[in-house]
Image (tube, grey):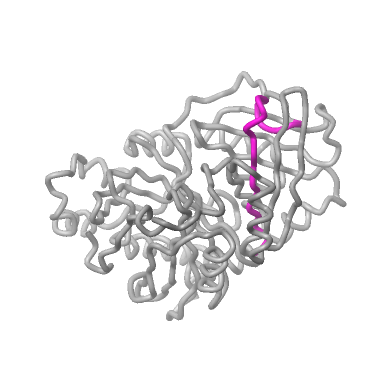
């Protein structure tokens, strides 16, 4: 376990024991990006990350103002949406933020109740409960705003047997590269402005019934030049985890400040996706052109045996393979984890992905923070934004 972080009780079941979960969440339903060219973005995620063609909505299906491509890999669904005319309001989002995450959709049993519970607790409504129907049944969706212009959509699909949502059709394509082993969304991280982290922590507690089960301050997450603070929010069953970051004072501009400058506000910083074989997955992703942050220095891997001494009997990893691919390793009381981070996946230095394999650990790699942020700072230096 990292020496820089206090022991934490990850037993969310104990935290919620005896409490009524007024917003039961079954998992992440989909993540929707607003992008400048959905057709080309879909090709990128298929080619680079191994997603498969799944569903489509556009002019051919009767959608006159937007087009959406749905990609799927195991339990992960990405929706890429582009407006079809200059007057559509989605253009404003793209002009301001660039390509990025607009909707984090959460799978629920009762979308109407989820909306009523959250709006009654202070959430700003994005979409009142709406029943959407086609020949395959019906879906009920509702939505609320969270940090920035990001939205949580509640999706109730128990009475639906179609490919995705009413209005979508199966997307048939002869080009479907093999998957890369990505399984599900482990967590999604949001960046918020100065002194806003605790505001949004309280919002998740009050509005959605989440708990803050892990915290890091600027003494734990810092380098020589910059720092940040983070708190991890989780729902009752632990299926949904949202770390929230804010900048902290440092000698130079932090990665959070850089994100806020280029995204022009709060938003989703990265999506962490799980794999059962990170070495195979990362090797495959690299061969397809996915760019990762620079490999940690030799000293990082030399220090692993000491840092993870308590877990020496559990480790089954080939350290040379991890080093070759730049994969980092850390541990907590529950076990260890392996993780690596891509470079931003668009021109603005905003959204990126994390690939993670959990071997019992329920933390977020506190022992890797210094190496990670130094790698990010090297990229900031190349971009001229570490000032």
Give coordinates of residue 349: x percent, y percent.
55, 59
Image point 44% across, 46% down: which residue?
186
Give coordinates of residue 343: x percent, y percent.
48, 52
Characterize the magenta stretch by its predominant secondary structure. loop
How many tags in the picture? 0
Q: Quadrant of the N terminus?
A: bottom left
Q: Is residue 87 magenta?
A: no
**Is 330 placed left or right of 187 in the picture?**
left
Q: Quadrant of residue 85?
A: top right
Give coordinates of residue 88: x percent, y percent.
84, 50
Q: Is residue 155 magenta?
A: yes
Viewer-proximal residue among 280 and 315: 315
**Is 378 placed left or right of 329 in the picture?**
right
**Is 18 placed left or right of 161 in the picture?**
left
- Vertical placement of residue 176 versus 288, above or below: above
Viewer-proximal residue among 375 and 276: 276
Viewer-proximal residue among 37 and 358: 358
Image point 57% across, 37% down: which residue?
77
Give coordinates of residue 215: x percent, y percent.
39, 67
Image point 47% across, 34% down: which residue?
288
- Vertical placement of residue 345 versus 373, above or below: above
Viewer-proximal residue among 159 and 263: 159
Residue numbers of the magenta segment: 148-167
Residue at the far top in the pictured view = 174
Q: Quadrant of residue 367?
A: bottom left
């Amino acid at each position: 376990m990292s020496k820089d972080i206090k022991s934490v009780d990850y037993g969310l079941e104990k935290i919620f024991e005896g409490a009524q979960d007024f917003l039961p969440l079954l998992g992440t339903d989909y993540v929707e990006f607003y992008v400048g060219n959905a057709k080309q973005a879909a090709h990128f995620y298929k080619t680079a990350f191994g997603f498969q063609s799944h569903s489509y909505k556009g002019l051919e299906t009767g959608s006159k103002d937007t087009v959406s491509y749905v990609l799927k890999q195991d339990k992960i669904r990405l929706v890429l949406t582009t407006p079809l005319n200059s007057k559509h309001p989605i253009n404003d989002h793209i002009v301001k933020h660039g390509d990025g995450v607009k909707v984090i959709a959460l799978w629920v049993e009762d979308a109407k109740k989820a909306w009523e519970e959250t709006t009654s607790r202070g959430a700003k409504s994005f979409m009142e409960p709406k029943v959407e129907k086609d020949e395959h049944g019906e879906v009920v969706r509702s939505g609320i705003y969270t940090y920035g212009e990001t939205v949580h959509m509640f999706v109730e699909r128990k009475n639906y047997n179609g490919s995705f949502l009413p209005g979508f059709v199966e997307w048939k394509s002869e080009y479907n590269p093999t998957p890369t082993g990505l399984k599900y969304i482990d967590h999604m991280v949001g960046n918020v402005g100065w002194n806003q982290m605790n505001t949004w922590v309280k919002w998740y507690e009050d509005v959605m019934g989440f708990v803050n089960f892990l915290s890091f301050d600027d003494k734990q997450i810092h380098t020589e030049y910059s720092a940040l603070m983070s708190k991890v929010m989780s729902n009752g069953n632990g299926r949904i985890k949202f770390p929230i970051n804010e900048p902290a004072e440092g000698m130079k501009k932090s990665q959070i400040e850089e994100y806020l400058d280029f995204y022009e506000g709060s938003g989703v910083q990265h999506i962490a996706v799980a794999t059962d074989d990170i070495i195979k997955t990362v090797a495959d992703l690299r061969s397809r052109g996915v760019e990762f942050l620079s490999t940690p220095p030799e000293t990082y891997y030399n220090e692993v045996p000491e840092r993870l001494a308590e877990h020496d009997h559990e480790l089954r990893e080939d350290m040379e393979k991890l080093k070759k691919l730049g994969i980092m390793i850390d541990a907590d009381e529950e076990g260890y984890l392996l993780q690596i981070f891509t470079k931003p996946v668009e021109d603005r230095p905003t959204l990126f992905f994390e690939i993670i394999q959990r071997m019992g650990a329920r933390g977020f790699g506190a022992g890797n923070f210094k190496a990670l942020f130094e790698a990010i700072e090297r990229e900031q230096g190349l971009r001229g934004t570490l000032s």
